Image (cartoon, rainbow, N blue to C red):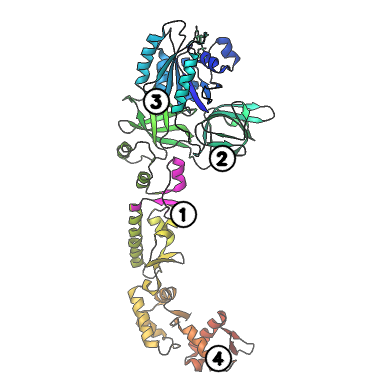
């Protein structure tokens, strides 16, 4: 299916033309028919000579209803520009064309109607000149009479040529259905309609309603008046939503593929066309079927920041237009450059931002986004409209490669400095390191720690006794040299003092696994435990404390806490008579 919107000045014959082409009535309201004037969007469809189906979104031409017109053309890729032969180019011919240009609509047809009332030549010449200067470029022109039917076969053939040129829809893209109508059907509940420009909808799909938390479920689908299990872009669709009250949504809302959009109320955009130097501070942003007041903050010569009065699900590259509702004037088009721009706090930030924006063209660019954002979640980029084809560095985090390398170096520096400043701690707490590097997620720290650094018990440090400050390490080496051949003799308290091993130093050595503490001021080398079990296993079982003390060639000061430690570890068992056995 193809969807084409009409455009043109009031009373130039848009609805008459749609009626003549489709046999359907685009003016749905009694008031429209009574006044002979379109007020709101109308919908009709027909089959072209080629067999293709074409649906029309018929828009009002009156200047008061331009916002309705914009809601209709916003999501539609092609336009039928209607000019009356007897009136020629008029103000809303110009305003509608400016809107199409601002939105970047590139496909269209000029239809000069009421050709039975006047020579279509002059209107055709003028309109073609106007259209030729816009995003539509050179268009085919057809003269018709909605009254006599003259020119309609030529118009149908021209529509076939137009639709054949339209780009193929991207049916695998996520759905962003801008709602242009919502109503209630008795027995079915809420129904919304819109132009599905990309993606695919199926009965049973769960969608997000932009700005609301709960999901909505597609209960039924209609397209061109018929129920269908599925509709693929491009299509006019009516979606029946299960359990969503009618007052929850209306024109300007959007139904979205879950997780693929991130509604934003702050965007940086490029003004397209000929931006005025003195933009009003408040304008209305029209995008899709939505119209939202915005505050405009100029940044660069053709870039501005827009603060939206309510969030919209925008993507990098989106086209939209700014309009001054008071002056009935399309101010210009915009192309969205950034849907999650940084705050502009400090002085000079706006100028710096303008420089960044000057480099952007609205084409999603992963490498550039990573360079600017340095660290960002893949899901976040996807929700901005940036395709992700790079491997994450940790979790779902992507990093700018250069930044990631720098972070790796910083980890080494910071941890080394920490070890120097806190010689008795077995490394830097992971969270302190995370905060020091201002990293948003602990998994990033974990991914940045590389040998010889390691994470042990929530701290980042060098592995093993290497982590000991040199004086403690030296003392431990002395202990090993002096006691290595009599491993169950513990240095006396005054010897420990001589070696510089106070309680804090002993604590550090114990945490690093360099010493084993049996009691206050009673330490052994860590291999002593296994050796002790081997010696004790050689004794006749059960054995007494005194037998153990002699076999180990040590004192009660060591033997008592050593056996208690072995009991606790389950290597020995104490019997009711205080003798012990070695447990196999
Ligand atoms: N003679 C003649 N009259 C026409 C032709 N097309 C439209 N009209 C008349 O022009 C008037 C306006 O036609 P519409 O089709 O309502 O115009 P419109 O562009 O839809 O107007 P809005 O929706 O209000 O912008 C009606 O009275 C039509 O009968 C035509 O080709 N020839
Ligand atoms: Mg009309």
Q: Disc 1 designates what residue? A: 395
Q: Quadrant of residue 430?
A: bottom left
Residue 78, how many percent across, how many down? 45, 25
- Which of labels 4 and 1 is toward the front? 1
Q: Quadrant of residue 385?
A: top left
Q: Disc 2 designates what residue? A: 213
| Residue at mark 3 to residue at mark 2: CA–CA distance | 32 Å
Residue 365, how many percent across, how many down? 37, 42
* 331 within the magenta span: no
Could you tell me which secondary element the residue under label 1 belongs to?
Answer: loop
| Residue at mark 4 to residue at mark 2: CA–CA distance | 70 Å
| Residue at mark 2 to residue at mark 1: CA–CA distance | 25 Å
- Which of labels 4 and 2 is toward the front? 2
Q: Disc 3 designates what residue? A: 102
Could you tell me which secondary element the residue under label 3 belongs to?
Answer: helix
Pick out the residue farthest to the top.
117
Q: Disc 4 designates what residue? A: 545
């Amino acid at each position: 299916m193809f969807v084409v919107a009409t455009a043109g000045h009031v009373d130039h014959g848009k609805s008459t033309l749609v009626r003549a082409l489709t046999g359907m009535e685009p003016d749905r309201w009694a008031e429209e028919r009574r006044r002979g004037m379109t007020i709101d969007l109308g919908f009709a469809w027909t089959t072209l000579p080629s067999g293709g189906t074409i649906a029309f979104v018929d828009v009002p031409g009156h200047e008061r209803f331009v916002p309705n017109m914009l809601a209709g053309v916003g999501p539609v890729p092609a336009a039928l520009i209607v000019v009356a032969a007897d009136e020629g180019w008029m103000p809303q011919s110009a305003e509608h064309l400016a809107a199409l240009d601002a939105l970047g609509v590139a496909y269209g047809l000029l239809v000069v109607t009421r050709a039975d009332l006047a020579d279509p030549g002059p209107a055709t010449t003028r309109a073609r000149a106007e259209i030729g200067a816009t995003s539509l470029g050179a268009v085919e022109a057809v003269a018709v009479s909605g009254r006599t039917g003259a020119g309609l076969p030529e118009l149908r053939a021209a529509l076939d040529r137009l639709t054949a040129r339209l780009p193929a829809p991207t049916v695998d893209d996520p759905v962003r259905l801008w709602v242009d109508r919502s109503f209630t059907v008795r027995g079915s509940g809420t129904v919304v309609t819109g132009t599905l420009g990309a993606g695919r909808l199926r009965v049973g799909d769960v969608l997000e309603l932009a700005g609301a938390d709960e999901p909505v479920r597609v209960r039924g689908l209609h397209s061109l008046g018929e129920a269908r299990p599925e509709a693929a872009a491009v299509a006019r669709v009516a979606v029946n939503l299960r359990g969503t009250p009618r007052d929850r949504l209306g024109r300007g809302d959007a139904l979205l593929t879950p997780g693929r959009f991130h509604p934003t109320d702050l965007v940086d955009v490029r003004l397209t066309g000929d931006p005025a130097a003195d933009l009003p501070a408040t304008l209305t942003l029209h995008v899709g079927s939505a119209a939202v007041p915005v505050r405009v903050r100029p940044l660069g010569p053709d870039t501005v920041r827009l603060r939206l009065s309510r969030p919209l699900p925008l993507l990098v590259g989106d086209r939209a237009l700014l309009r001054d509702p008071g002056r009935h004037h399309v101010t210009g088009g915009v192309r969205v450059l950034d849907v999650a721009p940084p705050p502009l706090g400090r002085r000079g930030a706006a100028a710096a931002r303008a420089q960044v924006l000057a480099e952007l063209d609205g084409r999603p660019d992963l490498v550039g986004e990573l360079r600017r954002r340095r660290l960002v979640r893949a899901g976040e980029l996807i929700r901005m409209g940036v395709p992700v084809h790079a491997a994450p560095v940790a979790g779902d985090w992507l990093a700018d490669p250069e930044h990631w390398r720098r972070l790796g170096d910083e980890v080494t520096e910071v941890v080394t400095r920490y070890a120097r400043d806190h010689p008795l701690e077995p490394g830097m707490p992971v969270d302190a390191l995370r905060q020091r590097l201002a990293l948003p997620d602990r998994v990033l720290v974990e991914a940045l720690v590389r040998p010889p650094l390691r994470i042990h018990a929530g701290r980042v440090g060098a592995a093993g006794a290497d982590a000991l400050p040199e004086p403690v390490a030296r003392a431990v080496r002395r202990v090993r040299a002096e006691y290595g051949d009599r491993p169950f003799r513990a240095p006396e308290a005054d010897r420990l003092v001589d070696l510089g091993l106070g309680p804090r130093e002993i604590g550090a050595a114990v945490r690093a696994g360099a010493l084993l503490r049996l009691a206050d001021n009673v330490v052994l080398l860590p291999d002593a435990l296994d050796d002790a079990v081997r010696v004790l296993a050689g004794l006749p079982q059960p054995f007494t404390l005194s037998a153990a003390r002699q076999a180990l060639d040590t004192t009660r000061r060591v033997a008592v806490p050593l056996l208690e430690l072995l009991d606790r570890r389950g290597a020995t068992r104490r019997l009711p008579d205080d003798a012990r056995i070695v447990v196999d």
